[in-house]
Amino acid sequence: IMLIDWFTVIAQIANFLILVWLMKRYLYQPILTAIDAREKRIAAQAELRKDELQLNAQERQAKIQEAQARLADKNSPAQQQEAQAKREQAQQDNQARAEDNAQKNAQHTAQGNGRAAYEQKQKEAQAHREDLQKRLKESGKKPAAGLPPPTDAK
């Protein structure tokens, strides 16, 4: 038959109770404290987010009202008249610029035609000189000496 050693059973029960107390004191309690702190931090962050969302909604609403007020100002008769006056002034400026450009183009064209006439006269003069030199060569005479350069009279 088996004999039970009551001293060993009581010692093991005492060891188990000491172990439970140590675990609760040094392991389980700090874990519970950390979990509670984390839950509180998460709740606080959620509250901050909620407040931030409400603030953003209020800001958006204020911006919408401000934009509507600006739109109402833009649609006022005075603003419309001012915008119409600006458009008319811009059209007049564009028309004046177009007229100035047309005038300048006409001047450039006229200058271009004058330039073409000048170049044509230069070509005719060159052809005339070449013709004269050719005639002189054919006649056997030496060409006349060029005119001396002008001297400044003081």
Image (cartoon, rainbow, N blue to C red):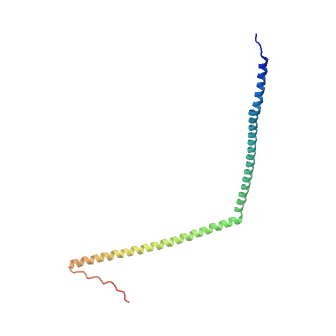
Can you name the residue that lies furthest to the front here?
7
Residue, x 59% and y 68% (percent of image)? 91
Q: Quadrant of residue 70?
A: bottom right
153 shown above or below 87: below
Left or right, 148 with reference to 44: left
Outermost residue to the bottom: 154
- Number of marks in picture: 0
Residue at 30% x, 75% y: name it: 127
Residue at 74% from the left image edge and 38% from the top image edge: 34
Position of residue 135 in the picture relative to residue 16 (left or right) = left
Residue 86 in the image: x percent, y percent?
64, 67
In the picture shown, does residue 19 fall above or below 140?
above
Identify the residue at the far left of this view.
Answer: 140
Q: Position of residue 116 (x, y in %)?
A: 39, 73
In the displayed structure, would residue 65 be above or below residue 33?
below
Farthest residue to the top: give it: 1
Q: Residue at x 39, y 75 (%)?
A: 117
Residue 36 relative to residue 150: left or right = right
Front residue of this view, candidates 10 and 104: 10
Of the 4 image quadrants, the one containing the N terminus is top right
Pick whichever, 29 or 7, lies toward us.
Answer: 7
Rendering quarter of residue 133: bottom left
In x, y percent, where is residue 24?
77, 31
**In what quadrant of the picture does the C terminus appear?**
bottom left
Residue 45 position, x and y percent, is: 73, 44
